[in-house]
Image: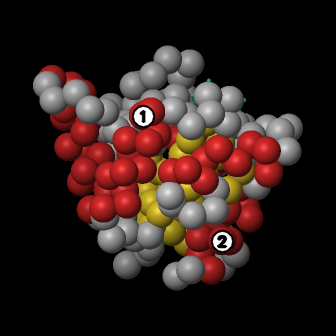
Amino acid sequence: MLPVITLIGRPNVGKSTLFNRLTQTRDALVADFPGLTRDRQYGIGVVGPQPYVIVDTGGISLAETGVEALMQRQVQHAIEEADHLLFLTDARDGCTPGDLDIAQRLRRLDRPVTLVVNKSDTLDPVLATAEFHQLGLGEPVAISATHGRGVRDLLEWVFAGF
Ligand code: GDP
Ligand code: MG
């Protein structure tokens, strides 16, 4: 069985953009509006000699009804089948109440999590990640999913822990 890496985080933080970069496809829809990915999306990535399964999700929501609740169940399933979670946040938004809520839930799981600060683009990584230490999920890793900056290092870091 290939290791399963699952992308989670609020809508619009760049999960699908990172998925596309890791799988080198355009299978995941990337949008300027939140909530477009309604379900899980599976792809294959490779780091060095190691292939892995990458899973994109529609984001975690607190809503209890309708489509939002369905998405939340899908995300729950995705988390259960993951070997490693990449929790994406957005450097431009900073650390939001939604991020704090997700972090609180993740700290209760016994799954390895790497905290990722996406959209770091041209920002200094130390400054971009500083406020995310408060999420209590270890050292945040700055990346830019659109530019590709930090992405290879991130995956090498994840697999060093396997
Ligand atoms: P998702 O909802 O988490 O899947 O987010 P998407 O991948 O759909 O991206 C949401 C928006 O953020 C899109 O407009 C992306 O182009 C943009 N985006 C994603 N990654 C980056 C990044 O590294 N830098 C910048 N500046 N924008 C990004
Ligand atoms: Mg998406």
- Is residue 61 visible to us here? yes
Image quadrant for the N terminus?
Answer: bottom left
Q: Provide the residue designation for mark 2.
A: 157
In-image side of 20 versus 119 (left or right): left
118 horizontally vs 89: left or right: right
Which residue appears at 50% of the width and 58% of the height?
136
Q: Residue at x 32, y 52 (%)?
A: 105
Residue at x 85%, y 38% (from the top left corner): 122
Which mark sits nearer the N-terminus, 1 or 2? 1
User: In the image as oriented, which residue stretches furthest toward the left?
Assistant: 65
Label 1 secondary element = helix
- Please tell me whether residue 155 is drawn above or below residue 119 in the rendered image: below
Picture disc at residue 98: 1
Q: Residue furthest front?
A: 134
61 relative to 140, above or below:
above
Q: Can see residue 20?
A: no
The picture quadrant where one finds residue 161 is: bottom right
Q: CA distance from mark 1 to mark 2?
A: 26 Å
Task: Say which amino acid is labelled 2.
Answer: Trp
Going by the image, does 74 lie left or right of 25?
A: left
